[in-house]
Amino acid sequence: MDANNKDLSNFSAKTPTVFYGGDYNPDQWPEEVWLEDVQLMREARVNLVSLGIFSWARLEPVQGQYDFDWLDRIMNLLHRNGVMVDLATATASPPAWLALQYPESLPVTKDGTTLWPGSRQQYCPHSKAYREAAALLVSQIATRYRNHPALVMWHINNEYACHVSECFCDASAAAFREWLRQRYGSLERLNDAWGTSFWSQHYADWAEINPPRTTPTQINPTQQLDWQRFCSDSILECFQLERDILRGITPAIPVTTNFMGFFKPLDYWKWAGREDIVSDDAYPDPSDSTSHVDTAMRFDLMRSLGQGKSWILMEQVTSQVNWRPQNVLKRPGQMRMWSYQAVARGANGIMFFQWRASRSGAEKFHGALVPHVGTTNSRVWREVKQLGQELSQLSEVLYSRVTAEVAILMDWESWWALEIPSKPSTSISFINQVKAYYAPLFAKNIPVDFVSPESDLSKYRVVLLPNLYLVKESTAQRLNQFVAGGGKLVMSFFSGIVNEEDHIYLGCYPAPFREMLGIRVEEFDPYVPGQTNSINLAGYGEYKCELWSDVIDLEGAEALATYGSDFYAGKPALTRYHYGKGVSYYLGTQPEAAAMSLLLARVCAEAGVKPTLAVPEGVEVVRRETGDSAYLFLINHNNTNVEITLDQPASNLLSQKNESVEAASLISLEGYGVAILASKISNPGIDQPVMGNK
Ligand code: GAL
């Protein structure tokens, strides 16, 4: 394997098919159980386990004294039974001795509270003692298992920052000062960037600067923004520390660390570029009838973070979790359906937390592949076996990819800056704004990629900007050029407001985009909760809007919608402007979903972007392609039967008999049913639909 080009498609040659398995914690069980485990793994066609994630205290019970015998035995046993290992570096939860010997390794909250051992993740990412102990453990593990035939992947730490995303201790304060020195070079630059002439905040010595600890009132926003950048970067340093050790010892083994979807504390664009395989943990709530939309959205983010490469669904649950107030069961078929949602959107691995349900501890009521009730006569186990059997037959989809012509710009720095208080409104949630764009496109089965401010936009026809509050000048220029060159762009209110130092772009909002949009925004009018207004959408009637109104003046653009009431009634709420060869849209408010849907349908039609297939409501369609083969995933999120019209023959890879589907015939999908229709592309490389109804 080429160490510089490790991705899943490279090493999946070693694996028969889609990865299937989960977190395996054999150290919670007597060894007799291990034999049953491997026999059941074979039965369920489990081919990969994530091993030892929380085993530090077992591997190094006393500082510097390692016990690998049990891990040797289970690694060998797994290998003999054809199960590959995603071996953990085990650094996610330090043993209690670390806290006892190095109390300064414990994290401290904003108000000075120490977080003690007794749960997990109790370490400060800046702690020298933690980093040194973690590095030693990783070297020991990597050296011992470097040539073990079961080892196919490294699982670095676990869900970085899940519980502790920032630490305010003195070591962290010192690290923050150092990070600021690197960023600004001089106190003069820092004072300027932070705008410290305000409220007597000027700094004359680096030692005067602190993390944004609890203060009397609003903290300097640029200080907060830099703190978020710093925290993401310093936790990334912990990851890199481990990764570099592993690269040195096992250059050919790919590394991953499991992400958590749209996780605010960590700028995953920076992270994803530093790992070989993107992986994600997703726990959609079965009690929420729209959770599959959020899940699709995060899966698209995962694919995009890996620049289109395959990724792994590293954790999900077979049925119910134990950490919600009420932990609703997945209904029969729902786990299978949601697993295929991941495969459809680019996953090459379907994994779970955890293999066997624990007898004790905080997660004993968390679902597993092997439930407490056992495997005989258990619904969960039957579903686990069925899915394992099906995935084992799906190797041909491994190399295919999803292509999108619509991109949503997703920038962590802008997200952080947008949600720092002291804004006109604290009710704007970046993720809700992203969803407002994503959901109508999902409903129409229009594929979407997420892009970073640095991404190449040239392959997209449409770029969507939900609340790009903070934007660098260079990014603004690239977005303007995208439109000038013929792209279609839609921007929401409160975008293009500040630069990367959170300083206002003067010259009327949104100054960096005014020329491209053909408008100016004179005032913002945030709404109180429950307050609404309306917009008159030319040709379509009146729709409710909420959250916010921009008071907009046209400077060349046309108004596609106007406000229904208030002192700005009749003024533009939605505008459209020809700029260069392209078209820009600006939306000054948050309209109800039906109006968002109309707007996006119009923009897509104008850009020539078509839905993957016209299907009944509640059916998700995703197309993956490779060479001359296409795979159309049809996923029925309804709990009732639907019928879908096809106009080209295709075989359903999931049907028992693998029968062909006749041209122009109907395919019937039961509630929560899934079909994967494989077909040949007659002109590979030419953008052409395989299925009809476009
Ligand atoms: C994840 C975590 C697992 C397990 C799981 C329970 O956040 O990585 O270790 O705790 O949640 O749903």
Image (spheres, rainbow, N blue to C red):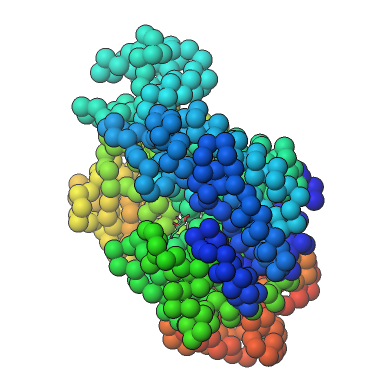
In the rendered image, the residue lying farthest to the top is 204
**Up-down relation of residue 213 to residue 366 (above or below):** above
Q: Is residue 616 left or right of residue 271?
A: left
Q: Nearer the viewer, residue 565 or 183?
A: 183
Q: Quadrant of ligand 1?
A: bottom left
Badge count: 0
Rendered residue at 35%/22% (across/down): 210
Identify the residue shown where x is 51% and y is 44%. Answer: 61
In the image, residue 460 lies at what x, y percent?
61, 53
Residue 448 rendering spot, x and y as whole percentages: 55, 59
Please identify the quarter of the rendering in which residue 121 is found.
top left
Above-or-below relation of 407 to 659: above
Q: Is residue 284 left or right of residue 686?
A: left
Spot occupied by residue 275 in the image (x, y as percentages of width and height): 63, 45
The part of the image, by quadrant, that contains residue 226 is top left
In x, y percent, where is residue 526?
Answer: 25, 45
Q: Nearer the viewer, residue 523 or 179?
A: 179
Of 560 and 635, the residue lying toward us: 635
The residue positioned 61% from the left and 41% from the top of the image is 138
Task: State whether residue 497 appears in this view.
Answer: no
- Above or below, comparing residue 383 to residue 579 in the picture: below
Residue occupying the point 46% across, 24% down? 175
User: Which image quarter: residue 367?
Assistant: bottom left
Look at the image and tell me in which quarter the C terminus lies: bottom right
Asked if residue 186 shows in the view, the reply is yes
Q: Nearer the viewer, residue 193 or 395?
A: 395
- Asked if residue 348 lies left or right of residue 578, the reply is right
Using residue 147 as the reference point, say whether residue 670 is left or right of it.
left
